[in-house]
Amino acid sequence: MMRVLGPGTSLREVIDEARDAGEDVVVVSARPTKRESIAEFGVALRLPEWFGHNLDALADSLHDLAEAVSRDGPPRHLVWAGVATLRADHPRAYEGICGVLDEVAEDHPRLHVTVVE
């Protein structure tokens, strides 16, 4: 499940709500460009050094992480925060990353994704 929340949303409330539901929360800060944003996913999710910095590599890595969550541990909640600048300046990049996040969340019910402006 992926949801997109607007500018009046409290990041702290999103995190607290997920933790109260027993979810392991990972926050990824959006960056001003597609490349920087994808790199930030790599850092926040502790992806290996060889992680490719493109949408296909992001999708593959997120699918692998989501499958691991399905086997053991609590559900994971991925919060992509601060997307307003990327969305305004690079709408195709924003849509591409959202498409990957939505696809992975649809395929893996124990991975929840929230995009916060």
Image (tube, rainbow, N blue to C red):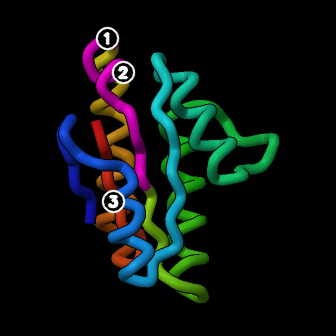
Q: Which percent across, then down, holds residue 77?
A: 43, 66
Q: Which percent across, then down, holds residue 32?
A: 46, 17
Could you tell me if the residues under marks 1 and 2 are in contact, i.e. CB atoms within 8 Å?
yes
Q: Nearer the viewer, residue 5 or 53?
A: 5
The residue identified by callout 2 is: 86
Secondary structure found at label 3:
helix
**81 inside magenta stretch:** yes
> Amino acid under label 1?
Asp
> Amino acid under label 3?
Val
Crowdedness near tag 3: few (<14), some (14–19) or many (≥20) residues, C-alpha within 10 Å? some
Crowdedness near tag 1: few (<14), some (14–19) or many (≥20) residues, C-alpha within 10 Å? few
In this view, the mark in front (2 or 3): 3
C-alpha gap between disc 2 and disc 3: 20 Å
Q: Is residue 14 above or below residue 97?
A: below
Q: Is residue 114 above or below residue 21?
A: above
Which residue sits at x=55%, y=32%? 54
User: Which mark, by number, is residue 89?
Assistant: 1
Q: Which of the 4 image quarters holds residue 107?
A: bottom left
Q: Earlier in the sequence, mark 1 or mark 3?
A: 3
C-alpha gap between disc 1 and disc 3: 25 Å
Crowdedness near tag 2: few (<14), some (14–19) or many (≥20) residues, C-alpha within 10 Å? many
Name the quadrant of the C terminus. top left
Q: Which residues are magenta?
A: 79-89
Direction bottom: furthest residue: 72
Q: Which percent across, then down, holds residue 76?
A: 48, 71
